[in-house]
Image (cartoon, coloured by chain):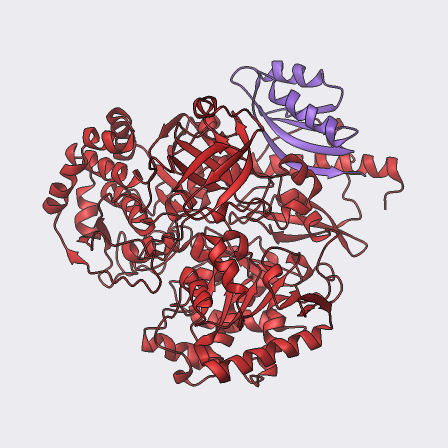
Amino acid sequence: MPIKSYIAYPSEGKRQELIEALKEFEECEVIPSENHKIIIVVTETDSKEEEKVMEAKLKEVNSLMMLSMVAGFDTN
Amino acid sequence: MYKQTEDRRSFLKKMAILSAVTTATAMFPGILFAEEQTKNLPVGDLEWKKAPCRFCGVGCGVKVGIENGKAVAVKGDPNSTVNKGLCCVKGYHAVISMYGKDRLTKPLVKKNGKYVETSMKEALDLVASKLKETREQHGNDSVSIYGSGQWTIPDGYVASKFFKGCLSTNNVEANARLCMAGAVGGFLTTFGIDEPMGCYEDIDHADVFVLWGNNMAEMHPVLFSRLLDQKYKRKAVIIDFATRTTRTSVAANKSILFKPQTDLAVANAICHEILRNGWENKEFVSKYCNLSKGKTNIGYGLEDKFKFKEEASAINLDEFKKFLEDYTPEKVEKISGVSAKDIKYMASLYGDPNKKVTSFWCMGMNQHTRATWINNLVYNIHLLTGKISTPGNSPFSLTGQPSACGTVREVGTLTNRLPYGVVMNPKHREKAAKIWNVPVSNIPPKPTYHTVEMFRALDRGDIKFMWIQVTNPMVTLPNVNRYTDAAKKEGRFIVVSDIYPTPTTDIADVILPSAMWVEREGLFGNSERRTQYFEQMVNPPGECMSDTWQLIEVARRLGFQEQFPYKEETHIEEIYNEYRQFHNNKKHNMAPLEVLKEEAGMQWPYVDGKPTQWRFNAKYDPACTKEGFDFYGKPDGKAIIWQRPYEAPPEVPTEEFPFWLNTGRVLEHWHTGSMTRRIPVLNRAVPHAYVELNPVDAKRLGISDGDMVLLTSKRGKLKMPALINGRGLPPVGQVFTPFFDENMLVNKLTLDAYDPISKQPDYKKCAVRVEKA
């Protein structure tokens, strides 16, 4: 049951769009910075397969410019 | 302490958030997050201890979470200026690699073709007696040790002291010869002293990054994140100059592809353009540079006992300009496939006095039969423009192993080296003998075998005993079939110290189980001259013992108690303090252990309580003895601009073998995969090797994605599945395969040619035939 945290960088001028897009995913907790464009994203999935699908979905978000992983845990 | 599953899950989620917040705070001072979202983040009852990462040479600072005597988690260390809290996919799974089911925990001795468990005492007795017997029967140079850039600093130090100082043989080598020797050759010939002048902080200052055959997005992902951050924050420009399209190319501002080996010609063309346009920094060149030329047509080391001796002679700038007339962008376009326009564009970036330029490279330039030359040529560009040793202006050779710099290059675990200087120099031998407490006559004045030649000597029977520690040469040596057969020959005795079974333990007569990473105390040194300490955090399993202590035990059995008097509980500190004596000067002074225990590493030269970020620049480097720049590795303080031509590689595609073969790594696996393949999530992500093909070639050969493909070179055959339009895209006429998979040994195909100056083999180009299997 993987849990991962990332720092997400929005594309130019698309911060709000990115926040909204990420909030659409049930598996994501979104923590925007109050004074900076970066956003912390925490994903929580039930299996490694779901995690893989989640990662693929994140990569397809157009307003996302870059995603840097910070930490990851498997609760199994 | 957290309770059962639900609590644990909630706890770990909060930990993940805390790690991200901490990292963001380190990267963006003053950054704020909504209070209600970050309140009650746990400190937790896991005990977090700092260490450098076990894997690549970036040297990320990590925190290892310890619970009930087991390492259970890793997170980036926000106090580390290297990674500022970031961690790559290998790093944060690192602790899992300690707990693979097939971990070696007992010594094994081969008896009648089968491995039999024994005690560590008996195994070490056997190693000592075989070592003694072989020396007595066949002489000092019949025994050898082969280590790696994963040796900790104390491991490499005691190996060198034992073999060079006590056993009187210079048969000491390490696998960094296969990955970093070209960089060392470049540094020594251009600057007279090894290791980068700059540091990772150059990333925060550079306007332009030129990546010379360096797929940083996969090989150095944390550093590449820092480059991308600068691209987005400051509009820094990234140029990917490579032989195949990779994830790095896609993320770069511009991808420029060149034909294998022709980086030599392109670098010369860039110099031609800089001089033709008058973009050179005339004052810098006249005050701080000399010009030289060396031998040409220098060979490739394909034959046993190949010898090369450089003969350098001075030239002037006009002669250099005349030489460069053969390298106009238009002429080089025909050799390299790089358009004259792109060559001029790259030259204009280097030539613009208002742009700070950092060049990064790694195996693309170093695994090259002209490795020293191409290193020289990139330095030429930086020296001509004076873009060196200042923040953001840096020619920067990255490393692939956690202590390739700290151990192999600084301790000097190569046949020609000593912890200070070289074996050929009587003063350097005297210094070593004094610190090592051995007669100076013990240290032979001549180097013996570099890595490829060492294994050839094993094949010939000149070497009969070899101790291999923390490396896997039966996967990594080029043309590996020859050396696997060599090790199995009658009369050879092979000892292998490792943590898992590998193709190298398969050829061992004795297998010694080693303690890994934070199961023992140690130090690594990374690419930016940063020395990092880690304490023992957990107990090693079974009878596992650190490589340092294995060597000490055997040395004592051979009667060298006086040279190895260390106490078990304090030996790392004693060894490090002894080693520091070699570098007790302003050019290389190393930080005291107590400082390293507190800090996330410290860069040498460490002088008056401060690290040195930019060497050779009097503004930053206390070792400089004159104003401005002082390249003090050379007697006159001047760096050398080298005249080096383009020369073709030893093997090129032919009608029979029409494809270039390039080999390398992938993000998920580190080197031969002996650790990362024991991490289930990484192994599932990339479970086996493959061959990348260009879709045009695949269509012509009737090969679809996943089809088995037969690769054939003059040296061997290999079947592997095709990968088409995967993460990498080779140009038409080239294929690429990663080397991490011991079940698909690509080095059965590669060529054991090497750079005659540095002796580094070339894994990036040989010729193969490609067929549907």
In the displayed structure image, the side of residue B654 where residue A33 appears, left or right: right
- The residue depicted at 34 percent of the width and 48 percent of the height is B389
Q: Quadrant location of residue B184?
A: bottom left
Residue B592 in sight: no
Residue B544 placement (x, y as % from top left): 70, 65
In the displayed structure image, the side of residue B97 where residue B426 appears, left or right: left
Q: Quadrant location of residue B85?
A: top right
Residue A40 in sight: yes
- The residue depicted at 66 percent of the width and 15 percent of the height is A21
In the displayed structure image, the side of residue B27 where residue B417 appears, left or right: left
The N terminus of chain A sits in image quarter: top right
**Chain A: drawing colour:** purple
- The residue depicted at 40 percent of the width and 49 percent of the height is B751
Residue B2 placement (x, y as % from top left): 86, 43
B307 is higher (above) or lower (below) than B615 = below
Residue B772 placement (x, y as % from top left): 51, 30
The C terminus of chain A sits in image quarter: top right
Residue placed most toward the observer, B175 or B420 = B175
Extreme residue in the right direction: B4
Residue B698 placement (x, y as % from top left): 47, 25
B542 is higher (above) or lower (below) than B187 = below
Residue placed most toward the observer, B653 or B773 = B773
Q: Quadrant location of residue B543?
A: bottom right
Residue placed most toward the observer, B753 or B584 = B753
**Chain B: drawing colour:** red
